[in-house]
Amino acid sequence: MTVLAVPAIRHLRETRPREMRVEINTPSTPNPLEFALSPDSRYIVFVASGDGPQRLWLRALDRTEAQPIAGTDSARFPFWSADSRSIGFFASARLSRVDLSGGSPQVLASAGAPRGGAWNGDGVILFVPPTAGPVLSVKASSGEPSPATRLAPGQTAHRFPQFLPDGRHFLFYAVGTVEAAGIYLASLDGGEPKRLTAADSAGSPLGADRIAFVRQGTLVTRDRRPAVS
């Protein structure tokens, strides 16, 4: 039994859960809801001012202090790459990325009045550059943006795209008439987006099969499959 106990104890030591400190006190911020957890659950990035300009702040969840990220003045709506190594954000009417390994931010596209972004494992970034218009896509390495959605009758804008775990399908929120507004499911492979539900907020994926959103002041979760009409 002693022979078996030694490797078992070693395994427990090697797989000890990573320490996390989840009480997060940020510097002063005008946009307390503009934050993002990294996909590997090791970091949080958020928008705050502190004693200087509004910019991105990064904190490891096994630490108690956050540090500002250089070159991100006026940043808004941060989002992570799928590998947790880079952060996308909007500042000075542009979409940019900054890598945790260091270096200056890289400008990827114009974005005059952004409404959210998302980044998949294939290096595709979805973003919404103006207040009114469809979701666009661009390569994280640079390139020309192209439409990823198109406005349907009764819609005035698409906002806050979110990739599902497969990296091909994504959610977005449509602004428009009662019949046309709500959370939609679309794909980078094309096809007509499918309306999932009416909502008062954008949808957030909960794993592969469920989404969370706000309706009439209540946080709701539901299956992401389209409702049968």
Image (cartoon, rainbow, N blue to C red):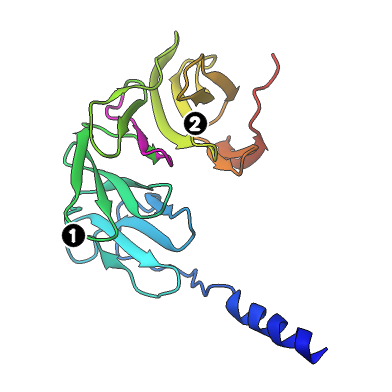
Residue 127 within the segment the image draws in magenta: yes
Q: Looking at the image, which residue sits at the far bottom?
A: 2
Q: Which residue is mark 2?
A: 168
- At x 40%, y 29%, the residue is 159
Category of crowding for the residue at label 2, using alpha-carbon neighbours closer than 10 angstroms: few (below 14), some (14–19), many (at least 20) = some
Mark carried by residue 70:
1
Residue drawn at the location 69% of the way across and 82% of the way down: 7
Seen from the viewer's position, the closer of residues 4 and 149 is 4
Any part of residue 116 in sight: no
Type of residue at label 1?
Ala
Magenta segment's dominant SS is loop
Q: Dot 1: few (<14), some (14–19), or many (≥20) neighbours within 10 Å? A: some
Dividing the picture into quadrants, the one containing residue 48 is bottom left
> Of residues 153 and 149, which is closer to you in this image?
149
Q: Which one is earlier in the sequence, the residue at label 1 or at label 2?
A: 1
Q: Is residue 197 left or right of residue 49?
A: right
**Numbered range of the magenta stretch:** 119-131
Considering the image in quadrants, where does the N terminus appear?
bottom right
Side (left or right) of 137 relative to 8: left
Which of the numbered marks, if any, corresponds to residue 221?
A: none
Residue at (30% x, 34% y) in the render: 139
Image location of residue 150, percent across then percent down: 39, 15
User: Residue 76: percent from the left, percent from the top?
Assistant: 28, 46
User: Label 2 amino acid?
Assistant: Arg
Instruction: In the displayed orientation, state which residue is furthest to the right.
Output: 1
**Residue 140 or 43: which is nearer the viewer?**
140
**Vertical placement of residue 85 versus 21, above or below:** above
Q: Nearer the viewer, mark 1 or mark 2?
A: 2
Q: Please provide percent x and percent y for residue 166.
A: 54, 37
